[in-house]
Image (cartoon, rainbow, N blue to C red):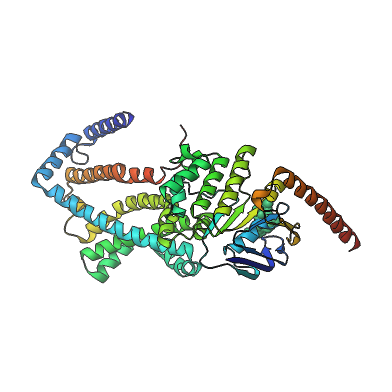
Amino acid sequence: MRLEVEITGKTFRSATSGTHEVLAPLKFALHSGEVGVLIGPSGCGKSTMLRIILGLDHEFQGRIARPPQARIGMVFQEPRLLPWRSVEQNVRLAAPDVTDAKLSELFRILELEAHRSHFPGELSLGLARRVALARAFAVEPDLLVLDEPLASLDDALAGRLRDEIATLVASRPVMTLLVTHSLDDAVRLGDRLFFLSPRPARILAEVPIAIPRDARADAEIAAIKAGLARRIQGEQGDERAGRDVS
Amino acid sequence: MLRLLSFALFLLIWWIAALFVGGAKLPSPPAVLEVMIAEASSGALFLHLGATLARVALAFVLAMSLGSAIGYLMGRVRLADKLGDPWLILLLNLPALVVIVLAYIWAGLTEAAAIAAIAINKLPTAVVTLREGTRALDRSLDEMASVFAMPRWRAFRHVVLPQLAPYIAAAARSGLSLVWKIVLVAELLGRPNGVGFEIGVAFQLFDTPRLLAYSLTFAAVVLVIETLLVQPFEARATRWRPRAA
Ligand SMILES: Nc1ncnc2c1ncn2[C@@H]1O[C@H](COP(=O)(O)OP(=O)(O)OP(=O)(O)O)[C@@H](O)[C@H]1O
Ligand SMILES: [Mg+2]
């Protein structure tokens, strides 16, 4: 399976100030088993791009090729749980085929066992995010889309969930698209990192990480990050220089 | 406890007023109770009450289901809203009496005409309430359902319906109180039985005890149905909301 994204433009019409451009032309593809990471400043258009890729927004210029039978697991930026259904029902409604064993395992990993029968209104934001993760994992997706899934979790838990995402990605051929502000998450999980510009978003740099995910020890990760930091500074220098000229 | 006290106070005021005004215009509580018991033991009370309740139930169900469906459609589809809006405004402003009289003229003094007239009176408020509820639906949850490829019916039942439930409950509550009032008029004008018919007869004979016996029994039945049926449904519909302890 393969996801092809070729967006040539996306503009929003705002009530007061006419139109504004959110996405500049951008193009990339993602294969099964690959994790693409989108990194960019707040408000640059990442969530907008994800909505387009998921087929929730059709008003854009360009083309998305997504295998029509692909099962999608999505963690939205905000949890988007059904407030009138319990935690367990929320997961089961999205993933009716999930087995009891699989569900129990997910709840154990995400430390949600005690909250199975709670309603979302009784959860903290971090707990609700974990339920959203459980829901996305439970569908056994072919395309997993995660919009800042580890925000508002403590470092230890975020680390464990990151490992969990890595395990899931390794266990099944799944295309994963991850939005994050954390370079650490990006480097630990990603196969290819896409650095986005401020609005309108375009891809500033596409950085593949050659070392397999499970072979990335702390030393390699530090090295990759150092390399990236140099590169980003370079790019920003170029950007500034480019702007000065124009 | 306080409710009971309040009710006792009501009886007391009624009794005192009856003493001042006189039995012909305002009979005392025992006199009314006597008529109630007589009518109940002859079976007439239950017959008329039953006829009225059956009409209420039919008209209510008809108006609620039709009104909810139309309201949902108008909330979802802009074209339906544009087309339906003038009709809605017309129906909302049409006096109940006009609808009832016209229904009897056009469809004869029939049961169907009575029920249709009552339902038509209730219909527009149900439509308006449900349209409001549909417009307030959370789009982000619709998106969630579509991303996870929930089948239509499951999404409707678990995502949409719970959001509409408070609006359905509100429409049911206000609609029921409207139907209670209109059914009596419809019966008075064109039915040979029911509480409205009996009140009409009592009015012609200036039989105040009988009039009060029927209307108070009817009011009591309404009260019981409201507390036993409508309120529990409302509570159930909003059960998931976190309550302040
Ligand atoms: N429905 C909308 N109508 C108009 N403008 C919108 C709409 N949705 C998003 N925008 C604008 O598009 C831009 C990109 O928004 P988007 O949510 O994609 O950002 P983001 O990259 O996900 O940011 P963050 O990291 O803060 O989540 C923002 O400037 C926002 O104001
Ligand atoms: Mg976002």
Q: Residue furthest front?
A: A215
Q: Is residue A210 visible?
A: yes
Q: Return the x and y of residue A88 as percentages of the image width and height.
A: 44, 45
Pick the residue in front: A238 or A175. Answer: A175
Of all residues shown, which one is farthest toward the right? A245
Please report the residue visible at 43 percent of the width from the left and 62 percent of the height from the top.
B152
A203 relative to B26 in the view: left or right: right
Q: Report if residue B124 is visible in the image.
A: no
Left or right? Give the position of B32 relative to B78: left
Report which quarter residue B182 is drawn in.
Answer: bottom left
Please give the name of the residue rendered at 46% of the width and 70% of the height, measured from the top-left corner: B83
Q: How many marks do you count on the picture?
A: 0
Is B206 rendered above or below residue A33? above
Q: Quadrant of the N terminus of chain B?
A: top left
In the image, B143 versus A217, the foreground residue is A217
Q: Is residue A18 above or below residue A166?
A: below
Residue at point 57% right, 66% down? A1
Question: Who is closer to the viewer here, B89 or A34?
Answer: A34
Q: Is residue B239 left or right of residue A46?
A: left
Q: Nearer the viewer, residue B17 or B186?
A: B186
- Residue depicted at x 30% and y 57%: B61
Q: Position of residue B243 (x, y in %)?
A: 45, 37
Spot occupied by residue A95 in the image (x, y as percentages of width and height): 45, 54
Across and down, in percent, residue B90 comes to 42, 65
